[in-house]
């Protein structure tokens, strides 16, 4: 029993070293923006509480083995009357743990509903930008309503600027996730979802799908490129001057289930600015009917 306990402690210690030693490699433990940082802090706080619980249980477990083991079991009666103080203690402790987990969790979740606080050196409020993100089998479409730009499988954002992400899906339900900038959020047909991201530094941040959506699921990765304000403005000007327009015919082609590379368009059909555009509604209805027919066939 002693050997087993020491082995368990060794495994736990190795796990702790592994977790703390990989923060620069594991994306979810390498926050590069205020949204991801709040979620990271919540993860670490939760882990600390769990570690305290595990340590407490192990200490009590070892104490009971030593105090009431076979060699020291004389006079021990497991049917003896309970200890009121101990019973109160092990009732109060779980309540305290739940409170310590619930309060920061609720606070963080509500805090993430609005734009991140300014992270620039001057503390000056920065005007957020909006990007509409649509998951399609098996690609990601990024639309800039203000700039009139559409991209496929990548997006460019200015650093230190809150970015409101408006999510929806055409086809299968999916999940938008950029681990270094924010936690995942689902995309669903006919149900718009919102989230915020922000990058504190220029960089290339890998995003991916976190929800299985068919045979092309493994190819549903994308890149969020954070640039300095001047470079972002230069990118917008270059796209508007040199990239082709997204035609309705091309857009319909993008909505078909297929794998695609990165694409950039200087404009998109204005009909797509309408909420729940009829064509997108039709595409989603077709997918739902196809899924029902497929299920009924089984």
Image (spheres, rainbow, N blue to C red):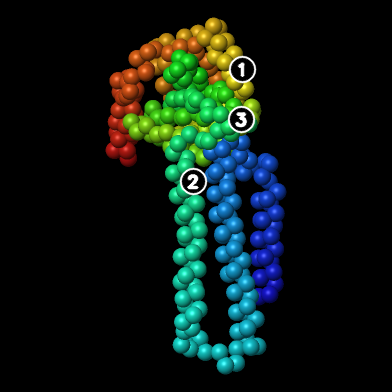
Q: Is residue 139 visible?
A: no
Q: Residue furthest top?
A: 241
Mark closer to the observer (3, 2): 3
- Callout 1 secondary element: helix
The answer to which of 290 and 35 lies nearer the viewer is 35
The answer to which of 232 and 139 lies nearer the viewer is 232
Q: Quadrant of residue 277?
A: top left
Residue 190's spot in the image, x, y percent?
33, 31
Point 52% across, 33% down: residue: 197
Q: Is residue 27 above or below residue 72?
A: above
Point 68% across, 41% down: residue: 24
Which label was assigned to residue 108? 2
Which label was assigned to residue 122? 3
Give the number of callouts. 3
Which label was assigned to residue 107? none
On screen, residue 99 versus residue 203, left or right, reads left
Residue 59's spot in the image, x, y percent?
62, 72
Q: Is residue 118 above or below residue 249?
A: below
Residue 270's spot in the image, x, y percent?
37, 13
């Amino acid at each position: 029993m002693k050997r087993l306990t020491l082995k368990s402690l060794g495994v736990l210690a190795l796990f702790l070293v592994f977790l703390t030693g990989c923060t620069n490699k594991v994306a979810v433990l390498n926050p590069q923006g205020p949204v991801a940082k709040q979620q990271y802090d919540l993860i670490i706080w939760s882990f600390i509480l769990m570690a305290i619980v595990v340590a407490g249980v192990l200490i009590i477990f070892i104490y009971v083995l030593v105090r009431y083991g076979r060699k020291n079991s004389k006079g021990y009666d497991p049917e003896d009357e309970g200890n009121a103080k101990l019973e109160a203690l092990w009732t109060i402790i779980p309540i305290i743990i739940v409170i310590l987990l619930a309060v920061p969790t609720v606070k963080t979740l509500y805090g993430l509903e609005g734009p991140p606080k300014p992270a620039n050196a001057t503390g000056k409020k920065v005007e957020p930008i909006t990007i509409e993100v649509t998951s399609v089998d098996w690609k990601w479409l990024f639309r800039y309503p203000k700039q009139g730009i559409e991209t496929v499988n990548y997006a460019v954002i200015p650093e230190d600027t809150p970015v409101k992400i408006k999510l929806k899906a055409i086809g299968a339900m999916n999940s938008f996730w950029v681990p270094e900038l924010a936690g995942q959020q689902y995309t669903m047909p006919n149900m718009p979802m919102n989230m915020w991201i922000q990058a504190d530094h220029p960089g290339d941040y890998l995003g991916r799908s976190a929800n299985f959506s068919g045979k092309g699921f493994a190819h549903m990765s994308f890149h969020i490129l954070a640039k300095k304000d001047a470079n972002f403005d230069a990118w917008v000007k270059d796209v508007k001057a040199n990239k082709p327009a997204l035609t309705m015919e091309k857009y319909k082609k993008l909505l078909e289930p297929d794998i695609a590379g990165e694409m950039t368009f200087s404009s998109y059909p204005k009909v797509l600015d309408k909420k729940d555009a009829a064509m997108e509604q039709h595409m989603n209805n077709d997918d739902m009917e196809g899924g029902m027919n497929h299920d009924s066939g089984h």
